[in-house]
Amino acid sequence: MNFVQAILMGIVQGLSEFLPISSSAHLVFTSNFYKVFQNIAIEMQSNEEVFFDIMLHLGTLIAVLIFFRKDVWELCKALFYACKSRNFSDNKAKLALYIILGTIITIILALPLNKVAAHLVFHPALVGGLLIITGGILFFSEYLSKKRDGKYTEVGLKHSLLIGLAQGLAVLPGFSRSGWTMATGLFLGLDRETSARYSFLLSIPIILGASMVYPLVKINVAEAVTYNWIAILAGTIVSGIVGYLCIKYFMKFISKFSLNIFGYYCLIMGVFTLIFFNVFK
């Protein structure tokens, strides 16, 4: 792990975590492009690289917490008072419960898929194929949303269950978490801004859990001392700054424009990586 690589991957994570283009796919591509040009075997991934990926996600988690700080505070407060009074009629309390429920559904689906996801890290061509599928999902969601015209402005039980399932599937690199969750929201008739906002809020518990569990369970303290911490922290800070700016401008974009541009990008990038990594195996 060097400083330039860390900064580059921080920018990639910050841009791709909240855009519907799969951050995990782009981290796989960036890492493996680097390995190809440095003549390093793709099958090799150090513990430092795995830990760095977690730190990059922590950077973007901080970005979404800062951007949605008022929403997060209001949801936590509403949930606290609802639990205290045993009255969950408040809309914000309901939304907090739906986020919890969606997260549980995500975990149930994502856990058995984790081994497959870890295996795909060493098969970037397959990840490119999954990215092509994401592009198709984005196109289809836009097609359906035009017919349904986004009639729902509040998330309901059905939305939380199905969007949670979509987020669980997106543990596979190439299946964009934000893309699949927003597309599912559009499938179900949510308006564009509600779908995007719920997607971002739903990401908080799952990224927070992954960022806490991995260091506590798997990190080897003696080995961690040897990591390039300057590069790791620099990449994390860059991912947070870029991620914050990305959320800010994407929320404005999604309220006015379609996801088709990202669908085209996923198709082009997916085809390119399929060809590239089949040539440079």
Image: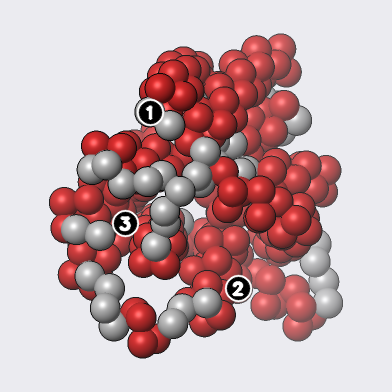
Amino acid at dot 2: Lys
Q: From this viewpoint, is residue 247 visible?
A: no
Q: Is residue 134 left or right of residue 32?
A: right
Of the image marks 2 and 3, the number of the one nearer the N terminus: 2
Disc assigned to residue 240: 3
Distance between mark 1 and mark 3 Cα atoms: 32 Å
**Circle 1 crowding by C-alpha within 10 Å: few under 14, some 14–19, many from 20:** few
- What residue lies at 50% left-to-right and 30% top-to-bottom? 125
User: Which x, y percent locates residue 100?
Assistant: 71, 63
Instruction: Check the image and report above or below for 144 versus 18.
Output: above
At x 52%, y 82%, the residue is: 216
Dividing the picture into quadrants, the one containing residue 15 is top left
Tell me the quadrant of the picture where the C terminus can be found.
top left
The spot of residue 229 in percent (x, y) is: 23, 72
- Amino acid type at mark 3: Gly
Q: Position of residue 44 (x, y in %)?
A: 42, 53
Front in this rendered view, residue 74 or 40: 40
Amino acid on which disc 1 is placed: Phe
119 on left or right of 46: right
In this rendering, the count of numbered labels is: 3
Specify the label residue 280 is tagged with. 1
Q: Position of residue 264 (x, y in %)?
A: 46, 15
Furthest residue to the bottom? 222
Could you tell me if residue 109 is visible in this image?
A: yes
- Callout 2: SS: helix
